[in-house]
Amino acid sequence: MLLVSIPVALTVLMGRVTAAAACNPGRTKDGNYYYDGFGASGLGTIGGTYATVLASSPYTNGDETVMYVKIYDNSSGDAALMEWEKTTGNPYEYAFWHDTANCGSGPCGYAIGSPSVGAHNTYTVLFNNCASNKVNFEENGSGVGPCQAVDFTPNAASSGGGIYTLANQMPGGTSTKETITGAEEYSNGTWHSYMNNAVHNTNGSSYFGYDVPTNYNADIWDLSCSS
């Protein structure tokens, strides 16, 4: 069993801006998934990851917008993650994990609660911490739900945003950005910042922006919106 200690100084790092207002980007509703985030792989088995994300309330057009923190298998894509998501109304938080024996081809999951818009919450996903081949989840240092079995070994970590139609706003705007703060992954017996080595991943570079102001922090935003 891998018992990991999360550096206190990093778990309390807060984001750098307040929540952006919703902004209609004026794009066509197409039903496709678009993402804008950061990933680190090739590090061997990942024992966990955490990052602090801003809970915002971007514009949505009947499909989900999400901000996630996850560990996953870089080959299969199977993952365990925490996220807030918004379809209508206020965002809501969830934990998801992959376990075919209990949940079939779709992910297992449960709802956590509704974060306060403008709050900065730290999502932590740990593997082999509570028991072998199981994951557990924490929010702001407190456990969320029981230990859960998974049927994959994570070798990558990632955090970022996603929209399930181009008509949605990617969290953040050019003036008021969506923040990912204090991002680390656990491998080879210690915690590492992964933003300085992370690969920026997006399938919508003409629509979304990003920057990495420090080794631990990153910002994303929708180029069609100022806030």
Image (cartoon, grey):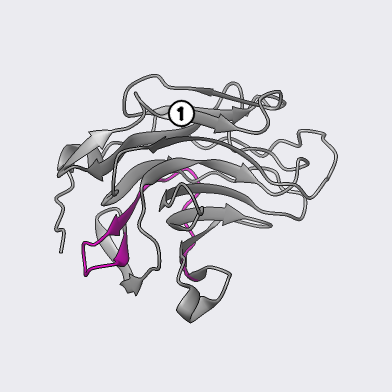
> Which secondary structure, mark 1?
strand
Q: Is residue 80 left or right of residue 106?
A: left
Query: Considering depth in this image, is 76 or 10 the residue closer to the camera?
Result: 76
Query: Considering depth in this image, is 201 or 155 the residue closer to the camera?
Result: 155
Does the stretch in magenta take in 128?
A: yes
Does the stretch in magenta take in 45?
A: no
Q: Is residue 103 left or right of residue 119?
A: right
In this picture, which residue range is highlighted in magenta?
109-137
Q: Tell how many labels.
A: 1
Q: Is residue 122 left or right of residue 191?
A: right
**Residue drawn where x is 32% and y is 46% of the image:** 50
Query: Considering depth in this image, is 121 or 154 the residue closer to the camera?
Result: 154
**Residue drawn where x is 65% and y is 57% of the image:** 89
**Residue drawn where x is 38% and y is 44% of the image:** 156
- Vertical comparison of 6 with 90: above or below: above
Q: What crowding class fits label 1: few (fewer than 14 Cα within 10 Å), some (14-19), or many (20 or more)?
A: some
- Vertical comparison of 220 with 71: above or below: above
**Outermost residue toward the front?**
75
- Vertical comparison of 91 with 194: above or below: below
Q: Give residue 142's position: percent from left, percent from top.
A: 25, 61
Q: Give residue 119's position: percent from left, percent from top.
A: 42, 45
Q: Give residue 31's position: percent from left, percent from top.
A: 79, 50
Quarter placement of the C terminus: top right
Query: Based on the displayed image, in which of its 4 quarters is residue 17 positioned?
Result: top left
**Outermost residue toward the right?**
28
Query: Based on the displayed image, in which of its 4 quarters is residue 97 positioned?
Result: bottom left
- Vertical comparison of 176 with 11: above or below: above
Q: Which residue is mark 1?
A: 199
Quarter placement of the N terminus: bottom left
Residue type at mark 1 is Val
